[in-house]
Image (cartoon, rainbow, N blue to C red):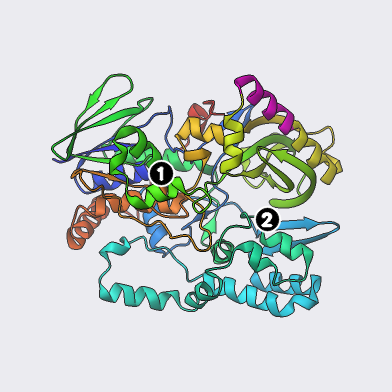
């Protein structure tokens, strides 16, 4: 039996392990932390659960290829419940507000009432979002395994979204927003994603929500990762925690073993690295193996930008409900190297996981760039801790200014920075996704093979921009799928489904309390 050694127990690593076991291979995962999930985690503070990752999960719509993958890996079950949300987000500016509702007709109507002079562009915007529902990531197999007819059919399925790409593919959100006269709509279009992102990125995100394909599983990020861990173990996989990798030993163009930081040596037939590519190519193996596209990306931070955040969590009265996610004007606040006059407040009362008695978790995130990361990195430990405390208090006062009903009611829970992601996940510049998709830059989309090493590949969100959970889970799957012919892989998947009686109910997995007290910030 071929042995697969997987570096990293995040969503990509767990997916690779699960598909390896389904395909009859021995599989071991080595994870540097004490719990699974990588960036897809949560933790507990003062009796409250804080969620780090899922703002929505692409692939929750039944019948989609990605939904099939989420179910295959156990992340979503037949009885999984979803939060009852009816909007994407709301933007405030001055005394006016605008909401992107799940109901596109309602959004069209309210935006037109807000700014009649923008009616033509508003109609186009809603049409573009409707067309963007057709932008569905292939999950049954990777593009490099497509045949001629697969490409033909995929192109047909994209429908009018192809025209959206043609018109907006070279525009940033900031540039696109200038088509609108309303200051509020301009703010709204650059609120959820940084204004440097490609314009269609927001449209696709909103379309996912509006199509019912971007719901939020109750229980949040950590429980999703725990369900995947359970699936992997139930299939006979082995996962080892607190086992960071130090080096891959290469002889005669093959990895012969992996050295862990505790001195342990691990052997296997095939090695799959699901950690950040900067970890693989600048720590585990010689940098000479790094593909040219990645060398360019790491050397061209203006073209290939990392995105992170400074985040703060509070406990607030459950009655506080300005909307699930609300962007507000704030007194300018310097965070890292930049100064910001907008931020959001995300209210988690929609899920009892994040409620304790009559109190709920609220969080905010201020985007951080490569320059901001460098600022945080320059601080001493004492300066770093003081900066976190002072900024958390500054965030509190700005929330209180926007929402006076919160004055004296919010309890500070935690704050985390780009360095938290770097320390916990070895994330490049603290990025919780892959490189930003910006107009004009060449999109990174690779198979993960490494020239000069026969039995090593990499998978995960850094294999495809813009990263995120869908990219992570599918690339974990694809790393295994490429080892087989299309027919053989499908036969093994179907054999496993028949053996399990896939329609039968699975046991629920409810052990969040046992692990979510781990400190990560």
Q: Quadrant of the N terminus?
A: top left
| Prevailing secondary structure class for the magenta stretch in the rendered image | helix
Q: Quadrant of residue 419?
A: top right
Query: Which one is in front, 191 or 56?
Result: 191
Left or right, residue 147 beside residue 434: left
Question: Residue at coordinates 48% horizontally, 71% vertically from top-left?
Answer: 134
Question: Residue at coordinates 34% horizontally, 46% vertically from top-left?
Answer: 15
Q: Is residue 410 above or below residue 63?
A: above
Q: Quadrant of residue 170?
A: bottom right
Estimate the x, y position of residue 274 in percent, counting from the top left. 35, 42
Q: Which residue is mark 2?
A: 191
Secondary structure type for disc 2? loop
Q: Quadrant of residue 320?
A: top right
Question: Residue at coordinates 39% horizontally, 29% vertically from top-left?
Answer: 32
Tell me the crowding category of disc 1: few under 14, some 14 to 19, or many 20 or more residues within 10 angstroms, Cα based.
Answer: many
Estimate the x, y position of residue 97 in percent, counting from the top left. 79, 60
Q: CA distance from mark 1 to mark 2?
A: 27 Å
Q: Which residue is mark 1?
A: 11
Q: Quadrant of the C terminus?
A: top right
Q: Is residue 229 above or below residue 191?
A: above
Between disc 1 and disc 2, the foreground one is 2
Q: Is residue 80 above or below residue 161?
A: above
Secondary structure type for disc 1? helix
Residue 386 colored magenta?
yes
**Magenta extent:** 380-392
Tell me the crowding category of disc 2: few under 14, some 14 to 19, or many 20 or more residues within 10 angstroms, Cα based.
Answer: many
N-terminal of the pair, mark 1 or mark 2, is 1
| Residue 95 visible | yes
Left or right, residue 24 beside residue 222: left
Estimate the x, y position of residue 80 in percent, counting from the top left. 48, 50
Estimate the x, y position of residue 70 in percent, counting from the top left. 40, 52
| Residue 318 visible | no
């Amino acid at each position: 039996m071929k042995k697969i050694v997987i570096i990293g127990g995040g969503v990509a690593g767990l997916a690779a392990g699960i598909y390896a076991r389904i395909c009859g291979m021995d599989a071991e995962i080595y994870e540097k932390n004490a719990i699974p999930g990588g960036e897809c985690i949560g933790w507990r503070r003062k009796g409250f659960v804080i969620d780090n990752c899922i703002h929505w999960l692409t692939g929750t719509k039944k019948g989609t290829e990605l939904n099939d993958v989420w179910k295959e890996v156990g992340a979503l079950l037949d009885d999984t419940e979803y939060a009852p949300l009816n909007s994407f987000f709301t933007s405030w500016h001055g005394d006016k507000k605008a909401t992107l509702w799940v109901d596109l007709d309602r959004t069209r109507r309210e935006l037109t009432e807000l700014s009649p002079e923008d009616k033509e562009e508003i109609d186009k915007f809603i049409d573009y979002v409707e067309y963007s529902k057709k932008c569905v990531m292939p999950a049954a197999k990777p593009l490099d395994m497509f045949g001629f007819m697969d490409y033909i059919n995929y192109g047909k399925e994209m429908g009018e979204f192809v025209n959206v790409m043609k018109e907006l593919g070279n525009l940033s959100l900031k540039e696109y927003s200038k088509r609108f006269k309303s200051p509020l709509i301009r703010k709204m279009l650059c609120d959820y994603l940084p204004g440097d992102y490609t314009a269609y990125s927001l449209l696709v995100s909103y379309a996912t929500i509006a199509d019912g394909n971007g719901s939020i599983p109750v229980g949040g990020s950590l429980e999703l990762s725990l369900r995947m861990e359970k699936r992997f173990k139930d299939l006979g996989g082995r996962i080892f925690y607190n086992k960071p990798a130090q080096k891959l030993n290469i002889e005669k163009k093959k990895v012969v073993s992996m050295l862990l930081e505790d001195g342990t040596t691990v052997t296997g037939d095939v090695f799959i690295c699901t950690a950040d590519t900067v970890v693989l190519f600048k720590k585990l193996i010689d940098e000479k193996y790094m593909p040219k596209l990645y060398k360019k990306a790491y050397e061209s931070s203006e073209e290939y930008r990392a995105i992170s955040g400074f985040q703060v969590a509070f406990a607030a009265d459950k009655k506080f409900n300005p909307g699930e996610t609300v962007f507000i004007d704030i007194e300018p606040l310097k965070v890292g190297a930049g100064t910001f006059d907008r931020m959001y407040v995300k209210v988690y009362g929609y899920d009892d996981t994040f409620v304790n008695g009559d109190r709920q978790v609220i969080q905010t995130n201020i985007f951080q760039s490569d320059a901001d990361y460098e600022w945080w990195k320059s601080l001493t430990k004492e300066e770093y801790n003081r900066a976190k405390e002072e900024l958390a208090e500054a965030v509190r006062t700005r929330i209180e200014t926007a929402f006076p009903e919160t004055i004296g009611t919010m309890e500070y829970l935690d704050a985390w920075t780009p360095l938290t992601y770097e320390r916990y996940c070895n994330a490049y510049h603290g990025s919780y996704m892959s490189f930003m998709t910006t107009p004009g830059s060449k999109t990174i989309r690779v198979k993960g093979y490494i020239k000069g090493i026969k039995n090593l590949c990499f998978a995960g969100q850094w294999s495809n921009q813009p990263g995120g959970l869908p990219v992570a889970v599918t690339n974990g799957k694809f790393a295994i799928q490429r080892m087989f012919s299309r027919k053989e892989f499908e036969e093994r998947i179907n054999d496993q489904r028949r053996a399990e009686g896939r329609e039968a109910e699975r046991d629920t997995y409810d052990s969040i309390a046992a692990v979510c007290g781990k400190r990560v910030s």
